[in-house]
Image (tube, rainbow, N blue to C red):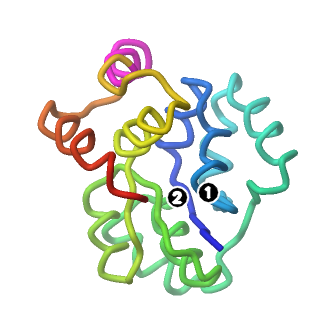
Amino acid sequence: MRIAVIDSSPLIFLSALGLAQELLKVFDIVYVPRAVHREVSKKGRFRSHLKRLYATRRFARCMAADATNVRLLLDQLLEGEAEALVQASERAAQFFIGDEKRAREIGKNKGLKPVGTVRLLARLHLEGWAEEPEGLVRRLCRDHGFRVSNSVVREATAMAAEPI
């Protein structure tokens, strides 16, 4: 089973593009940590997106059982990222969906495969489930404050052929 835990920014950005549900074509289940749910729910327009995602029963809320490990990571990460990484271990997830470089490094050191928003957009495009990633990234930057370098976009697009 392909299990992922998602951080706030990819969930927000993919929802803004109407592509969050497409994650279910890549992953069997996507866990949403409590802190991530809280952060995404603050943005009123995304509450209905979350409800629809949870209705699939393949997006699921989760809470970290090991609060100590979450607190230890809070020195380096935001709460949602820390919870996601701890919950990835607790839920036997193979994937961490996140954009923050430090969180991705920690996830990789924990044996997770980190996947960012742009890589997901590139893969979804390759499979025919999304528009070309450069245009989607431009839209996210213009309308939602997404920040990413051109080199990251090029690298993610080049990696699209590699399975996630």
Direction from residue 134 to residue 68 in the image, left or right: right
Residue highlighted by disc 1? 35
Which image quadrant: the N terminus? bottom right
**Where in the figure is residue 23, as x and y percent of width and height?**
60, 46
Give the farthest residue toward the left.
151
Q: Going 41% across and 36% down the picture, which residue do you hit?
A: 126
Q: What main secondary structure does the magenta stretch of the protein show?
A: helix
- In the shown orientation, is residue 101 left or right of residue 64? left
Please, is residue 101 above or below residue 66 in the view?
above
Residue ID at (42%, 43%): 123
Give the quadrant of residue 164. bottom left
Evaluate if marks 1 and 2 touch, with contact meaning CB atoms under 8 Å apart.
Answer: yes
Q: Is 25 within the magenta?
A: no
Range of magenta residues = 136-144
- Residue 141 belongs to magenta span: yes
Q: Which residue is found at the position 41% from the left and 81% from the top?
A: 72
Q: Nearer the viewer, residue 46 or 3?
A: 3
Q: Which residue is mark 2?
A: 80
- Residue 160's x, y, as percent? 33, 46
Label 1 amino acid? Ala
